[in-house]
Image: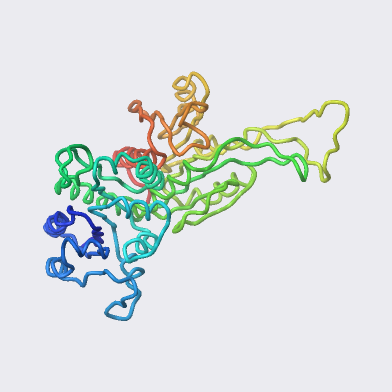
Amino acid sequence: MPVVVLGVTGCIGAYKACEVLRELQRASVDVHVVMTAHATRFVSALTFESLSQHPVFVDQFELGSNSDIRHISLADAADLLLVAPATANAIGKFAQGIADDALSTLFLATRAPVLVAPALNVNMFEHEAVAENLETLRRRGVGIVEPGSGYLACGWLGRGRLAEVPEIVQAAMDVLARRQSMAGQRVLVTAGPTVEDIDPVRFVSNRSSGRMGYRLAEAARDRGATVILVSGPTALPPPGGVDFVPVRSAEQMAQAVSSRASAVDVVVMAAAVSDYRPARVSDVKVKKSDGGFPLEMVRTPDILRGLGQAKGALFLVGFAAETDHLREHARTKRREKNLDLLVANTVGQDGSGFAADTNAAVLMDADGEVEVPLTTKRALAERIWDRVAELRSRAPVKA
C-alpha cells in the first residue's frame, strides 16, 4: 500500500484536507498527517488522528513510538509528500530551505516526490515573492496543483482558492502511479559538458550547465529506476540516490559509458560532448607571443554513434542542440545514429537551451514528432520518460 504524508498548513482550506485524506484512503492509500501549529487552530490534530488512524505529527521534537526521529522516519516511508493546503508561509519555507517546524523539516528530509496545493488570497498569490517561490519549487521538480478562481474565504473574488478535492487526489494518484513506473529498470544518463585541455591552464569546452541531464536522472530515480549519472564538470551538486560518475574529457566519458552500457536498459545521452579536442596537450603553460596561436584539433569519439551501431536491445535517446534548421538537422541525426528517440532543441533563444532552468523541445521517433512548449527542465524530463515508456512498451524489454 503506498504511503502519502499529508501536510496541512494554517488556513481555512485546512478542513478540505480531511476530504483529501478520506478520498486517498478510498484509493487504498495509507495516509499519515503532518500539521503546522497554525493548522491546528483551524482543524484539531485529533480529527486527523481519528481519520488516519495514525498519530499526527505536529512537534518536530516529539519522538516516534519506537523513539525514532519522526521527520526522518516519515520522510523515508513516504511515497509522496502532499501539502494541501499550502500557505504562502509554507511555500516560502520550502523554497528557501527553512526548516523550523515538523513539516518544513520533513520537506527537506524526504526524497519522495512532493506536491503542493496553494491556498492564498488573490493578492498574496499574485505577489512577486510568492510567484518566485513557486517558480523555484517548479524548477526543483515540486508539482504544483494550481489553485482555482472564485470567491475566497476573505470575501475577495479571484485566483487563489484551494483546488477542488478530486483534482488534488487525482494529481496525487498520478504521481504515485509514476512512482514505481520504472521499478527494476536500469538507466544511464550523461550530463554536462566535456572539457578538453590545451595546457595546464587553458581548455576548450561548451556552454552546457548539466541541468537537463540532472533533471532526467532525478526523474528516473523518482520513478523507481536504478540510475547511473555520468557527468562532465558542472556547478551542480550530485543528485542523491544515483550512482554518480564524474568525468572530464570526451574520452573519459566514452570509456565510462561504454563500460556500463551493456548493464542497462536505457541510455540517455544528454551531455554536450566536445566534437573536437586539441591534437596535442602541452605539459606547461603556453606563453603568449606576438603571433597567433594555431590550435590543431582532432575528432573525439562519437559516443552516440557507437552506441547506435551496437545497441541490440538497448533503448537509446539522444539530444540535438541546434542554432538553425532544427528539425532537418535533428531528423538526420536520429536516422544516422540509429536512435529510438531524439530530443531536439534550439539553443540561443530566451529560456531555452544551455544555462537555463527551462527548455522547449521536439521529441522525435519513428512514429512522428511531438513539440513540447517552453517548460521547466524537470517537466520536460517527465515528458521524455513518459515517451520512453510508451515506445518501450511496444517492443520486447531487454532481459
From the top left corner, tell me how far across and down residue 242 is, in percent.
46, 56
Considering depth in this image, is 317 or 122 the residue closer to the camera? 122
Considering depth in this image, is 292 or 13 the residue closer to the camera? 13
Residue at image location 41% in from the left, 35% down from the top: 340
* Above/below status of 265 relative to 32: above
When asked about the image quadrant of residue 272, the answer is top right
Considering depth in this image, is 353 or 89 the residue closer to the camera? 89
From the top left corner, tell me how far across and down residue 127 is, in percent.
34, 41
Considering depth in this image, is 34 or 15 the residue closer to the camera? 15
Residue farthest toward the front in the current orientation of the protein: 155
Position of 84 compared to 232: left or right?
left
* Above/below status of 111 relative to 235: below
From the top left corner, tell me how far across and down residue 205 is, in percent.
64, 37
Residue at image location 50% in from the left, 48% down from the top: 261
From the top left corner, tell me how far across and down residue 305 is, in percent.
54, 34
Q: Which quadrant, please, contains the N terminus? A: bottom left
